[in-house]
Image (spheres, rainbow, N blue to C red):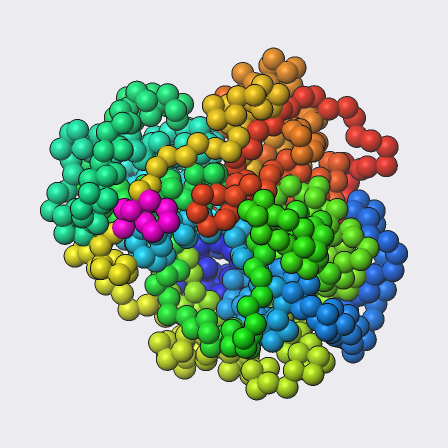
Amino acid sequence: MRGACPHDCPDTCALRITVRDGVAVKVQGDPEHPPTHGALCTKVSRYAERTYHPERVLHPLRRIGPKRAGEAPRFERIGWDEALGEIAGRLGAIAARDPEAILPYSYAGTMGLLQGESMDRRFFHRLGASLLDRTICASAGAAALTATYGGKVGMHLEAFAHSRLILIWGSHSIASNLHFWTFAQAAKRAGAKLVCIDPRRTETADKCHQHLALRPGTDGALALGLMHELVVNGWIDEAYVAAHVQAGPRGWAALRERALAWPPERVADECGLTADEVRGLARDYATLAPAAIRLNYGMQRARGGGNAVRLIALLPCLIGAWRDPAGGMLLSASGWFPRDGVALQRPQLLGARRPRTLNMSTIGDDLLRDGGEPLPDGSRFGPRIEAIVVYNSNPVAVAPESAKVVRGFERADLFTVVLEHFMTDTADLADIVLPATTQLEHLDVHTSYGHTYVLRNEPAIAPLGEALPNTEIFRRLARRMGFDDADFADDDEALARQAFGGAVDAAALASAGWLKLPLPDAPFAHGGFPTADGRVIVDAPQHGVPDYLPNHESPRSTPALAARFPLAMISPPARHFLNSSFVNVRSLRAIEGRPLLEIHPDDAAPRGIADGQRVRVFNDRGEHHCHAAVSTRARPGVVVGLGIWWRKLGEDGTNVNQLTHQQLTDLGRAPCFYDCLVEVSTAPAPAEGLRPAEALG
Ligand SMILES: Nc1nc2c(c(=O)[nH]1)N[C@H]1C(S)=C(S)[C@@H](COP(=O)(O)OP(=O)(O)OC[C@H]3O[C@@H](n4cnc5c(=O)[nH]c(N)nc54)[C@H](O)[C@@H]3O)O[C@H]1N2
Ligand SMILES: Nc1nc2c(c(=O)[nH]1)N[C@H]1C(S)=C(S)[C@@H](COP(=O)(O)OP(=O)(O)OC[C@H]3O[C@@H](n4cnc5c(=O)[nH]c(N)nc54)[C@H](O)[C@@H]3O)O[C@H]1N2
Ligand SMILES: [Mo]
């Protein structure tokens, strides 16, 4: 059977699933799909192990007993009819008072357009529930790309094979963008130079020709420094800039002035690099053509992440890199896809209502707010959140400042419904858990943010137990609530046809499994950016000319705080987990071992920390216990807490998000996971009653 990987990853692989007697026995990469190239990552090659996991939730469950994180929760099995009846009753009663007291909470547990953003949205629109701003991952970069190019567009993945210089900027490609790495390797074999820009010396950095270990959140300063060098050395492609970049005093001229204030010495001092590294990078960028940038989301999880993306996105325009298919940049390709959000999500079901929008990244604060509470911006909160319906996400593990998120989900007066495959940290705190199907059990269609193919996923096996697709759960819930609108009658095949309007031949997609979008090879060789006038924007409405913004928390921007918490912590994904997914797959957890904090020997020694020792990582928001990996993978002054462990599988019932904060980025209202100060000390032995992670099932 033909499938598509559902996970939140730029690669969106095409799958081939072998089914024997109704059982999926093998999940492999499609050898014919160019980005997938027949290879899967270690995680998804274990997808069948995840689907048939003995701990799959296969029946609706209702909580019995109190909500207390860290304690084994008690649930009883109930039937679908009873579960839907209870949910409809509770949501109906709240909606009769104020539907905005109900909040949907979802992210990209599946990236499928059907199981991720179709019937669910119709249901909540019809209900008039609060809207959710889905900011937890990519919205700073997305807003920045849109403010610069007019949309989320970039190079074709395959073109990187022909680049002569590739800057891998804020990306651990081998871990989180493996199928890009294949093309980067091809370029390397053909003589290209690969440079990795990342505070951590990742396995990707090991395999590049050069690694620039800058301080977290200083990418904007580095980009300004590169611009400085391009200007003073006469490396600007004046013709391309004149034709395709915003003109006038607020255009490139204004940014050029700003860049001239950033000579290599100043940049080096801010970024923790040497001036020669900055000069050398600029020279390579200007002289090794075609030059490509694979920018990724790791560098936008800091206060100035949006401005940094805007600055970096301007670089290829300044040297005219877009003239060549193998030049330019890629952060996200998702804007190329012709998806029909209105047809899928039916915002017209809102009628005249305009519900408030809550930011998923501040769920910790918002669950604890009272109705009408005054907010920092002078407005008022609206109704207290009385019910939350969580699907495709595990907020208790992944949202920042977990202590508050946990307290919110522990509220006895909060009605929580979780649609899940497993008893995650979030499902443990639910009132009702509903069993959802996995990608092997349902239909879906997919776009990608790292390549330019649409894909279709056929159900390969029948749903396990009583599991149902998200679409069907919301369809049944709508019926139960008495919503008789035609919008709830569409089956999944109908949704799949609506997803792309007429822009994709649904029959051709169904028979081929994937189709490449018809796009030019060098999309901006002659300009034509998707902005109002086709030119790249420098001075964006509301945001002005981009600039470097230092972190919310860093030794330089907040020295008083840094006196108490001197180490910057970043928490990028562990290679064998996918955010918090797969943490419960035994074979993958065995590879990752236990929650680790990488710390440089120069930071470990004065704290008396030895490799493998239990450590306590702490700041004013909380503390998290894990084990030290004393290693030069971490640069001095920066520690790395690899994520995202399930809290209950961690050392002390917490994970790295115990330490992160809820402040937001400059653009896109996104979280600042990698903009965080901590201190580290040796930790006492585990508390009585808490078992180390390895002992748990
Ligand atoms: N194996 C695996 N693959 C994944 C995921 C996973 O959890 N596991 N997650 C998926 C998801 S949801 C996403 S969004 C993507 C994420 O993948 P990416 O977009 O690549 O982002 P991150 O993994 O967050 O960070 C990438 C690198 O940025 C570095 N970094 C941290 N701070 C900075 C900084 O200030 N500047 C610079 N230049 N670099 C910095 C980190 O050390 C890390 O090595 O990957 C997807 N793929
Ligand atoms: N400290 C720190 N925190 C981070 C990050 C970081 O780098 N550091 N990364 C952030 C990023 S980039 C992201 S994207 C978020 C990710 O956060 P989430 O979007 O919450 O992603 P996951 O943790 O993978 O959880 C997804 C859940 O959806 C479930 N699921 C999958 N498919 C389906 C389905 O078809 N139906 C239903 N009902 N459920 C399904 C899975 O079982 C899983 O439990 O985390 C963010 N949090
Ligand atoms: Mo993400």
Image position of 546 (left or right of 2):
left
Please state the extent of the stretch shown in magenta in the rendering.
537-544
Q: Residue at x 14, y 52 (%)?
A: 243
In the figure, residue 526 lies in which quadrant? bottom left
- Does residue 222 sit above or below 533 in this rendering? above
- Does residue 331 sit above or below 352 in this rendering? above
Relative depth, front residue between 21 and 136 = 136
Residue at the front extreme, as displayed: 378
On the question of residue 624 being in view, the answer is no
Relative depth, front residue between 519 and 215 = 215
Q: From the top left corner, tell me how far across and down residue 342 is, in percent.
A: 46, 74
Q: From the top left corner, tell me how far across and down residue 337 is, in percent.
A: 37, 66
Residue at the left extreme, as displayed: 239
Image position of 226 (left or right of 98):
left
On the question of residue 231 being in view, the answer is yes
- Does residue 425 sit above or below 192 in this rendering? below
Residue at the right extreme, as displayed: 65
Q: Residue at x 72, y 62 (%)?
A: 387
Q: Residue at x 40, y 68 (%)?
A: 454
Q: From the top left corner, tell me how far across and down residue 461 is, in percent.
A: 61, 73
Residue 541 covered by magenta stretch: yes
What number of labels is visible?
Answer: 0
Q: Residue at x 64, y 78 (%)?
A: 475
Q: From the top left corner, tell me how far across and down residue 277 is, in percent.
A: 30, 25
In the figure, residue 531 lies in which quadrant? bottom left
Q: Main secondary structure of the magenta part?
A: loop
Residue 239 covered by magenta stretch: no
Image position of 421 (left or right of 354):
right
